[in-house]
Amino acid sequence: MAFTAGSLLREAGRKLADAGFESASLDAQILLAHVLKRSREFLLIHSDVVLQQQEQAEFELFVNRRLAGEAIAYIVGEKEFFNYKFKITPSVLVPRPETELLVEHTLVFLQKVLQNISDEQQKTIRYHDTCTGSGCVGISVKAMLPLIDVSVSDISKDALAVCKTNMVAIVGYEIPYFESNLLDAVPGTFMCITANPPYVSTDYTNMLMEKKLKEPRIALDGGVDGLDFYRKLIPDAYKKLQEGGALLVEIGEEQALSVCEMYSKTGFTDITVYKDLAGHDRIVFGVKNEVLS
Ligand code: GLN
């Protein structure tokens, strides 16, 4: 039997809503748009389009994967972040909208550094994004500030493979990358370092794993209190920052106090916490300023 886009969307939307998915109709639209290689807008305008049997079957398969808990980004293989399309596989975390805030504050800091300096000098400004995963933070910054010297790192080879595809698709070429536990294998010093490290407690990660979203544990599990990676990263980054350089990290909403304490014990100044759109503490910023301190 032939079905129209509209009727299939309604049926899938109902199934997903009944199963408790909050974004049921949006999910159904994204999945059907992906099957038909069309935009969501097209589907809404042309809800009378009749699907081929094969398209129907593929859509049903996708809806069932979603019903089993898999993240939409893994089913369609991509996610929009900072207006760029990132390829996403279960080797990397699905980029979150709140992580765009890390990009925004990094750009604000770097733009101040770049003020009033020549293009030639801009090329010597070094910025590094560790725990890069899909590369969403580092690649977005490079795309916005193409002159500066950007590099990225991740401990996972599989994540770096995804990241390399995204570099070529978004920046046009591969930017330097390192397979590294945090900054261990990353050479040189930097004016800015960013990280969205795993910061979810092991207990909570176990719960997330049961939801079968298929996100990699290695990108989420930050140890018993979720803070393990900050304990190493904050002092390591301090050593690799130039005078006046900044470290920006994403944090879990209850971690601001502990992370700020680590920043200040390490010697950082100008320590600032930024909230996300939901009002949760999300980004910690600090500057290495040995002359003043
Ligand atoms: N924000 C993510 C979550 O709550 C975690 C991201 C991370 O650990 N860096 O699932």
Image: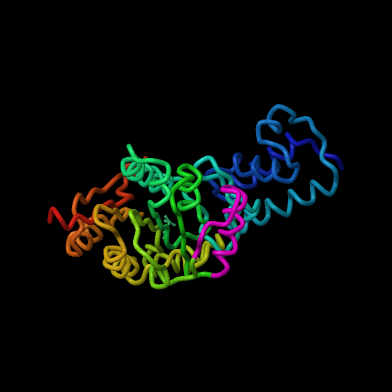
Seen from the viewer's position, the closer of residues 47 and 116 is 116
Position of residue 107 relative to residue 209, above or below, is: above
Seen from the viewer's position, the closer of residues 140 and 191 is 191
Position of residue 1 relative to residue 234, above or below, is: above
The overriding secondary structure of the stretch rendered in magenta is helix
Residue 248: image x %, image y %?
A: 33, 53
Residue 48: image x %, image y %?
A: 78, 30
- Quarter of the rendering containing residue 197: bottom left
Q: Is residue 124 visible?
A: yes
Q: Magenta stretch containing residue 11, yes or no? A: no
Residue 71: image x %, image y %?
A: 57, 54
Q: Is residue 243 left or right of residue 181?
A: left
Position of residue 21 relative to residue 115, above or below, is: below
Magenta segment boundaries in residue numbering: 157-177
Q: Magenta stretch containing residue 168, yes or no? A: yes
- Please state, as top left, top right, bottom left or bottom right, where the C terminus lies in the image: bottom left
- State the residue at coordinates (46%, 51%): 137
Residue 180: image x %, image y %?
A: 45, 71
Q: Is residue 176 left or right of residue 28?
A: left
Seen from the viewer's position, the closer of residues 21 and 116 is 116
Question: Where ligand 1 lies, by quadrant?
Answer: bottom left
